[in-house]
Image: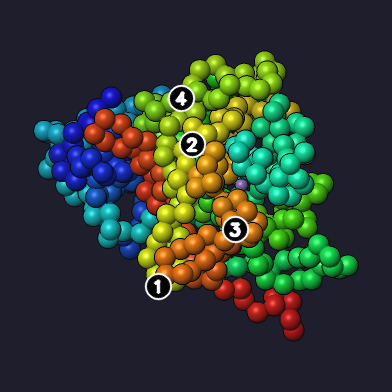
Amino acid sequence: MSLRRSFVESANAPDTDFPLNNLPFGVFDDGRGPRCCTAIGESVLDLGAMDERSMLPGGHFRSDAINDFMAGGPGLWERVRNTLTGLLAEASPSESLLAPFLHPRDAVRMRMPFQVAEYTDFYSSRHHATNVGTMFRGPETALPPNWLSIPIGYNGRASSVVVSGTDVRRPWGQLKAPDADLPVFAPCKRFDIELEMGAIVGTPSDRPVTVAEADAMIFGYVLLNDWSARDIQAWEYQPLGPFQAKATATTISPWIVTKAALEPFRCDTPAREKELLPHLRDCGPMLYDIDLSVTLAPEGKKATTITRTNYNMMYYSAAQQLAHHTTSGCGMRVGDLLGSGTISGTQKDSRGSLLELSWSGKEPLELPGGITRSFLEDGDTLTLRGAAKGEGYRVGFGECAGQILPALDDPYKR
Ligand code: MN
């Protein structure tokens, strides 16, 4: 696959996240209300306005969310992608027809691209699970006994999911020092990021599905930052898993990059240490080669890259996670969001959380200007980026960013 050239000149630059090959879906607002759109180079294309003139198949973009379009199913996804690819191609006869619907991307505000039906977060990077298990429980029991057989997950909160650019307020919660008799209620002191990918379910199910069926149900992917209060988590998580530690906010990138755009970048999951039960076995390459990174910018300071990793580091794919999710008969809905779990690589500088990067605060990160970080400080801005790299082009996700606001006064003080 090589670059598909567009009449939108900025879409042909080798470093743009949004060449014609990409065509991600999002929702923008230019002051006249939220409308569905796609990104092309430095522009957004107003799909809502085009739909009002019946220029697209299906008529599902007269909405402030992508859900209606996703519910149209894989046949519609393909028809719309093919239509947009033709309309936006270099030397397209439609160039002047499309001009009124193209707006500079830096002049519009991106909104939540879809209504999150439900949110589940997994724990499917072996390096992350091993690192966290070593810190929380010790090296002997680092990887839980079920880990190599099941993509472990917990049911999160759809209400916690916010779009890139939304500020994140430091939470209060119950914290207990290891040597203290009783917990205290206080602002989180160990607030953290989790570098993840999110898979979005585009067609529903009401029965157990195979890995192949699960892959067909996935509409696309976003970057996802699962903000985590490590001190709250350490006290609350046994035996039912994370709860309030993960409920403050989960930030996603504003663009849903479709499975179709990522098709050339598919890759295999790693060799299995223990053979999986038949219903979870791979039936083709289900992961993607997507370079990922995170920058940290202290308030008023330059951003520094604190980690680089790749989605191909996962042990379980989103299709395996989704198949496992349905084994009980659990129904899946259009707009369900599945977090991959923190994506950590094998190297120290490829770890996907500050908990791992600073080894629970024992080895603080050093930033320029003598600044150090074990966990997040107020005013810090964290930005996730990701892109699959082709020959002379990239399929990118844009930015997934959030700034930490200081904790409010004690919410229970009267
Ligand atoms: Mn997570």
The residues bearing labels 4 and 3 have C-alpha atoms spaced at a distance of 34 Å
Check disc 2 and report its element: helix, strand or loop.
Answer: helix
Distance CA(mark 1)–CA(mark 4): 40 Å
* Disc 2/disc 3 C-alpha distance (Å): 25 Å
Query: Which numbered marker is on residue 58?
Result: none
Q: Amino acid at mark 3?
A: Glu
Picture coordinates of residue 217, whole percent (x, y): 52, 28
The answer to which of marks 2 and 3 sits earlier in the sequence is 2
Compared to 40, does 187 lie above or below? below
Could you say which is closer to the camera, residue 285 or residue 321? 285
Q: Residue 108, relative to residue 82: is it above or below?
A: below
Residue holding disc 3: 363
Query: Which amino acid, mark 2?
Result: Tyr
Q: Are marks 2 and 1 in contact (CB under 8 Å)?
A: no
Question: Which residue does the numbered mark 2 point to in the structure image?
Answer: 311
Question: Which mark, by number, is residue 267?
Answer: 4
Q: Residue at x 39, y 28 (%)?
A: 265
Residue at left 45%, top 30%?
Answer: 288
Disc sitting over residue 300 in the figure:
1
Q: Are marks 1 and 4 in contact (CB under 8 Å)?
A: no
Q: Quadrant of residue 61?
A: top left
Q: For numbered disc 4, what is the local secondary structure?
A: strand
Does residue 98 appear in the picture of this structure?
no
Q: Secondary structure at mark 3?
A: loop
